[in-house]
Amino acid sequence: MGTAIATSKSIQSEEIFQLQQELIEKDKLLAQKDEELQSYLHMLSHELKTPIVTMQGYTSLLEDMFGDLLPEDGKKFLKGISNNVERLETLVKDLLTLSGIAIQHSEFTVVDINDLVDDIIIDLYGAYQFKKQPFTVQENMPKVFGHRDFLRHVYTNLLVNSIKYSNENVPLKIEIGCSFDEIFPKFFVKDNGVGIPSSARKRIFNMFARAGNKKNVSGTGIGLVIVQKIIEAHDGEIWFDSKKGEGTVFNFTLPVQKEQTSSF
Ligand SMILES: Nc1ncnc2c1ncn2[C@@H]1O[C@H](COP(=O)(O)OP(=O)(O)OP(=O)(O)O)[C@@H](O)[C@H]1O
Ligand SMILES: [Mg+2]
């Protein structure tokens, strides 16, 4: 009797072991397929760049050299082509970034978030020429161990979203900071924009997902996918809270140096 139980136990553990091995193998296969897909996406978006640049060149030549000869309708059609070529360029650029986010941990350095954000804000001022200073940046945010260029992408995407999806009726306010209420420091970008409707909340981090919460704002719906991928490549998490008409706050965690967190 005792030996029968022992044998059935050892059969069970053998089965569990075999299932575990199968799972490990399937996991490896999936990771390999994912890598293949990434590299196809990368190649494809790279290949698309040349014809797009050529199209841009010809449309602008057409506009410059023969634009005046075209009737009004013709000018409109040409503008339609050039706008869409531009959209295609943005889309391909985003796809290229997305497929290139195989972050090398060897490229991680200590990143001063205050320094990074100040730098981005200068660029945004150049691009948007705000009438009133919309940014409030918390001083002395903790330094992060990460990939500076990719973290630049994170902040730029979030800040550009806050600007794009702003509330027309109130002056734009964007708060950038880090709170220490929880175990991990929580970085945030908070705005007083149009907010994200609850119907769109589940899909906002999906590819090409747009909430349609503000009219006439262009975009491809890839920005947040890129942001999430970068945060996850830093072993962090990203989530948001939003109230329609009142604003949105994007929160995320990043690896900060231990000595800094313990002092808070
Ligand atoms: N701060 C925000 N306030 C309100 N809505 C937002 C905010 N950030 C994102 N959204 C909503 O989430 C959608 C997805 O954002 P995401 O940045 O991925 O794409 P996008 O801005 O539409 O295009 P792009 O790929 O050019 O960034 C947006 O279309 C918008 O509807
Ligand atoms: Mg965006």
Image (spheres, rainbow, N blue to C red):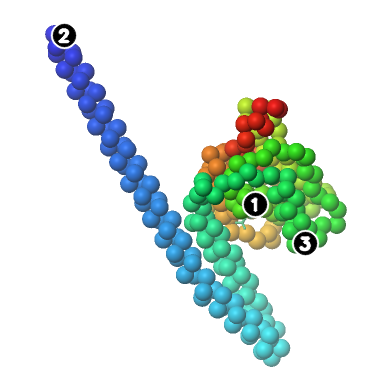
Place residue 5 in its image quadrant. top left
Residue at the spot 62% in from the left edge and 75% down from the top edge: 82
Q: Amino acid at mark 1?
A: Arg
Residue 263 placement (x, y as % from top left): 70, 27
Residue 191 placement (x, y as % from top left): 74, 45
Residue 222 placement (x, y as % from top left): 57, 55
Residue at the spot 18% in from the left edge and 14% down from the top edge: 6
Q: Amino acid at mark 3?
A: Gly
Q: Amino acid at mark 2?
A: Gly
Q: Are marks 1 and 3 in contact (CB under 8 Å)?
A: no
Task: Give the mark nearer the N terminus: 2 vs 1.
Answer: 2
- Residue receiving disc 1: 152
Q: Are marks 3 and 2 in contact (CB under 8 Å)?
A: no
- Residue receiving disc 3: 126
Q: Comparing marks 2 and 1, which lies closer to the viewer?
A: 1
Between the residue at mark 2 and the residue at mark 1, the CA separation in whole angstroms equals: 64 Å
In the foreground, 14 or 258: 258
Q: Residue furthest top?
A: 1
Place residue 22 in its image quadrant. top left
Q: Which quadrant of the rendered structure holds the C terminus?
A: top right
Between the residue at mark 1 and the residue at mark 3, the CA separation in whole angstroms equals: 16 Å
Residue at the spot 51% in from the left edge and 75% down from the top edge: 51
Residue 31 placement (x, y as % from top left): 38, 47
Task: Give the mark nearer the N terminus: 3 vs 2.
Answer: 2
